[in-house]
Amino acid sequence: MWFRNLCVFQLADAFKLDAEQLETALQPGAFQPIGGHDPESRGWVPPLPTSEQLVHVVGSKRMVCLQTQSRVLPPAVVRENVDNRIDEREQSMGRPLGRREKARLKEEVTLDLLPRAFTRSKRCYAYIDMEGRWLVVDAATWREAEILTDDLRAMLGTLPIRPLQTDSAPHQVMTDWLAHDRFPSDVEPGEEAVFEDPRSEGAEVRCKRQDLRSGEIRGHIKAGKRVRRLALTWDGRINAVIDSDLSIKRIKPTDQVETDADDREAESQAERFDADFVMMSGEIGRFLPRLLTWFD
């Protein structure tokens, strides 16, 4: 199992919690199925489906998983029921309802519909690398990642982390790479980029299946646009899209890594899970320090 997106936090040296202590701390927050009138339930579940442990340990890595179960109420359904109830109430009272009365009716309708609503579950995985001092969250945005880190901090009482930070602005460095066709020796540009115009909010150009070394691409930069998102291949082993906020999108191993993985036979689901975890965390553990050097 490879994470699809990465939001990475640097872990302070002061964090020394071992796997057993982490397991004990998470147990009170274990996931409980959503109640009849609850809009959402969130808690910790075993990362490995065949295990009961909330912390899955491989070497110096500890994986955790936060599950969120929420009820799905389509806004159109709520609105239709609210409108019908407002009409009934206004006819019975012989007057139009005020704003507060309508708001209370909406709350009543929502509570009535919740037990009949469908539920949707979502899992967010993360792992702590005690040796590399990383907390790696499989999340597309920092806001999603912070839901997990906030819940983890609540269970532990403290969580000394900070998002990745660099000396140079990533958008400036990546723009310079394309402007001068000068990439780090272990980086090969992909075929996708997003450019933004800092002079016009919301103005952007999206390029897909494009030669990023072409004059057309450099023309966007000459026109004053800068790179916000760039696809690349690192060291022939990882394909990813780097965002200017240092989140990493659509990370994927290359065929070379997949070939290495196929050479390792696993006899059970747990062994395959561990093998994938070891390979993924190993590649990411090599990639992250290198990424920081590009922008420092």
Image (cartoon, rainbow, N blue to C red):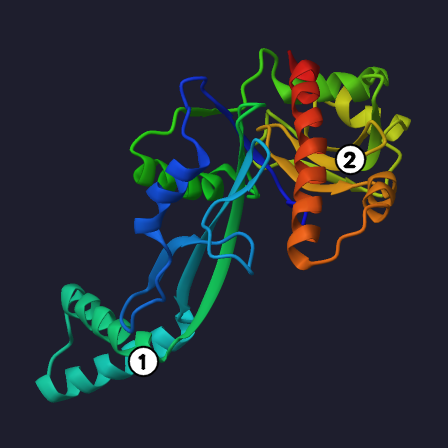
Residue 181 placement: quadrant: top right
In the rendered structure, the answer to whether residue 81 lies left or right of residue 6 reads left
- For the residue labelled by badge 1, is the local secondary structure a helix, a strand or a loop? helix
Viewer-proximal residue, 206 or 22? Answer: 22
Residue appearing at x 85%, y 17% in the figure: 185
Check disc 1 and report the residue beneath it: 81
Mark 2 or mark 1: name the one nearer the start of the chain. 1
Amino acid beneath label 2: Ile
Question: Farthest residue toward the left?
Answer: 93
Q: Is residue 194 visible?
A: no
Q: Position of residue 10 (x, y in %)?
A: 51, 23
Q: Position of residue 63 (x, y in %)?
A: 53, 42
Residue 155 placement: quadrant: top left
In the rendered structure, the answer to whether residue 259 lies left or right of residue 275 reads right
Question: Farthest residue toward the front?
Answer: 267
| Callout count | 2
Check disc 2 and report the residue beneath it: 238
Q: Position of residue 135 (x, y in %)?
A: 52, 32
Q: Position of residue 262 (x, y in %)?
A: 84, 48
Viewer-proximal residue, 88 or 294? Answer: 294
Viewer-proximal residue, 168 or 224? Answer: 168
In the rendered structure, the answer to whether residue 229 lies left or right of residue 200 reads right
Residue appearing at x 84%, y 15% in the figure: 182
- For the residue labelled by badge 2, is the local secondary structure a helix, a strand or a loop? strand
In the rendered structure, the answer to whether residue 188 lies left or right of residue 43 reads right
Q: Residues within 10 Å of mark 1 (few under 14, many from 20)?
A: some
Please determine whether, in this image, residue 257 is positioned above or below residue 235: below
Amino acid beneath label 1: Asn
